[in-house]
Amino acid sequence: MIIKKLTRILFFSFLFLAATNTLQAQEKTSNTEDAQLKETLYKKFKKEVQSYDKKEFDALFFEFFKKTKDKTLTLTKEEFYTYTIKIAAYSEKLGLLYKDQKETADRTKQEWFDKSYTDYLNSKK
């Protein structure tokens, strides 16, 4: 019962952070090279991430935000997309677990899939 409540709290916190970040985003351009990399990473990590428990996801999520906010560290394109795609895959898992929140989970998954390495680099300036 407690785990279910914590998972929901984390899920809604996650959605809030994603929505806040999206509001600050600028118009995005589609890059086929990035799209191919994202699809490759999604196929590579989907099963692994969907077996994550809450603790593993929390560690991944907070590590990503810690690294992206660190002004002395710049992630490579593959590192950046590995984090965002793993988070997107976990959002998909939450949609499967909580059928009543599937639409929200799908939107969140898409928002994480749509993250741009170029925008990340621009935020480092």
Image (tube, grey):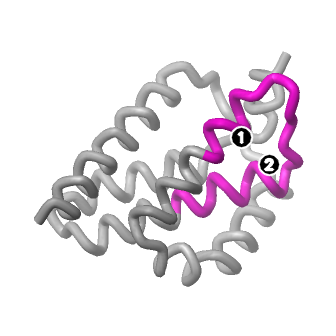
Instruction: Name the image quarter holding the C terminus.
Output: top right
Element carrying mark 2: loop
Residue 116's x, y, as percent? 71, 40
Residue appearing at x 21%, y 58% in the figure:
101
Q: Amino acid at mark 2?
A: Asn
Residue appearing at x 34%, y 39% in the figure:
13
Residue 23's x, y, as percent? 48, 22
Q: Main secondary structure of the magenta part?
A: helix
Residue 73 among magenta residues: yes
Of residue 85 and residue 111, the one placed in the foreground of this image is 85
Left or right of residue 106: residue 9: left
Q: Amino acid at mark 1?
A: Ser
Separation (CA) of disc 2 from disc 1: 9 Å
Within 10 Å of disc 1 (Cα), the crowding (few <14, some 14-19, many 20+) is: many
Q: Earlier in the sequence, mark 2 or mark 1?
A: 2
Q: Provide the residue designation for mark 1.
A: 116
Name above or below for residue 62 compared with residue 57: above
Q: Residue furthest top?
A: 125
Q: Residue furthest left?
A: 1
Instruction: Give the label on residue 38, or none.
Output: none
Residue appearing at x 67%, y 33% in the figure:
28
Element carrying mark 1: loop
Q: Provide the residue designation for mark 2.
A: 31
Left or right of residue 107: residue 96: left
Asked if marks 2 and 1 touch (Cβ < 8 Å), the reply is yes
Residue 6 among magenta residues: no
Instruction: Name the image quarter holding the N terminus.
Output: bottom left
From which residue to which does the magenta span run?
Answer: 63-88
Of residue 7 and residue 25, the one placed in the foreground of this image is 7
Left or right of residue 6: residue 41: right
Quadrant in the rendering for residue 79: bottom right
